[in-house]
Amino acid sequence: MFLAGVGSVLQLLGGMAVPLFAFLLVEGFLHTSDYRRYLLSVVLFALVSEIPYDLAVYQRVWAPMGQNALCSMAVSLLMLYFLRMTRSMGTAAGILSKLLIVAGAVAWVSLLHAEYGLSIVLLAAVFYLFYARNEWKMALGILISLLHVTGPLAFYGIWCYNEVRTGRIPRYAYYLFYPLHLLALGLISVLVCVSPCS
């Protein structure tokens, strides 16, 4: 019962983090001076996080049936790159191209069975395409984040965001936190399941 309760709490926290992941991904995309390096960092940490993710979720070192959330973010970054290429297109062609690009990203995260894939892709698309239209961005984002019970709670922090970075923590510390916390959860999960789950 205790473990089920802990799992539920972690799922609720994860749902609240999804809009923040997507929002910060778009902010990073718009403000990065080196897109390739940014994409490479996300892809690299997605690969590093896969074994810890499989341990935490499936209690196995390798489980190809699902991929971690950084895979969803990598696909979303590629989607954002192609969406940016549609800026110079006419209205009808631009709208159709945007819809096809977002649909393609949704298809990729679905094929990969990437965690939070649908939510992260749709939220990243909304945050990017409606970047200057704050009310639309917030309304559509909250609607999409209803896929997770606690998702809408994240929008208070997004609404208060003022584009000023005050933290002094190195950016790679944020990247490292994801695989390290998954590794800790995976080791706990494997240890707990050694006798009762075998």
Image (cartoon, grey):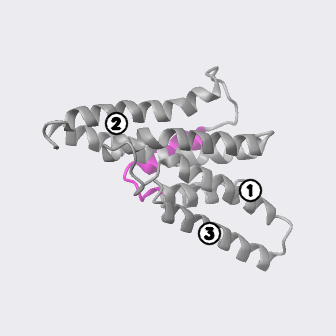
Q: Which amino acid, mark 2?
A: Gly
Mark 3 = which residue? 104
Cα–Cα span, label 2 and label 3: 32 Å
Can you tell which mark lies on residue 81? 1
Can you tell which mark lies on residue 186? 2
Cα–Cα span, label 1 and label 3: 13 Å
> Circle 2 sits in a helix, a strand or a loop, which is it?
helix
Decide if residue 171 is on the left or right side of residue 97: left
Cα–Cα span, label 1 and label 2: 33 Å
Q: Is residue 167 visible?
A: yes
Seen from the viewer's position, the closer of residues 146 and 169 is 169
Q: Position of residue 190 (x, y in %)?
A: 27, 36
Seen from the viewer's position, the closer of residues 144 and 54 is 54
Q: Which amino acid, mark 1?
A: Tyr
> Circle 1 sits in a helix, a strand or a loop, which is it?
helix
Q: Which residues are magenta?
A: 145-160
Mark 1, mark 2: which one is toward the viewer?
Answer: 2
Seen from the viewer's position, the closer of residues 75 and 128 is 75
Can you tell which mark lies on residue 109? none
User: Is the residue marked by circle 1 packed among few (<14), some (14-19), or many (20+) residues within 10 Å?
Assistant: few
Q: Position of residue 180 (x, y in %)?
A: 45, 30
Q: Position of residue 193 (x, y in %)?
A: 20, 38
Q: Residue at x 39, y 51 (%)?
A: 63
Q: Position of residue 188 (x, y in %)?
A: 28, 31
Decide if residue 196 is on the left or right side of residue 72: left
Decide if residue 146 is on the left or right side of residue 109: left
Q: Is residue 150 magenta?
A: yes
Q: Earlier in the sequence, mark 1 or mark 3?
A: 1
Quadrant housing the N terminus? top left
Name the image quarter holding residue 106. bottom right
Q: Which amino acid, mark 3?
A: Gly
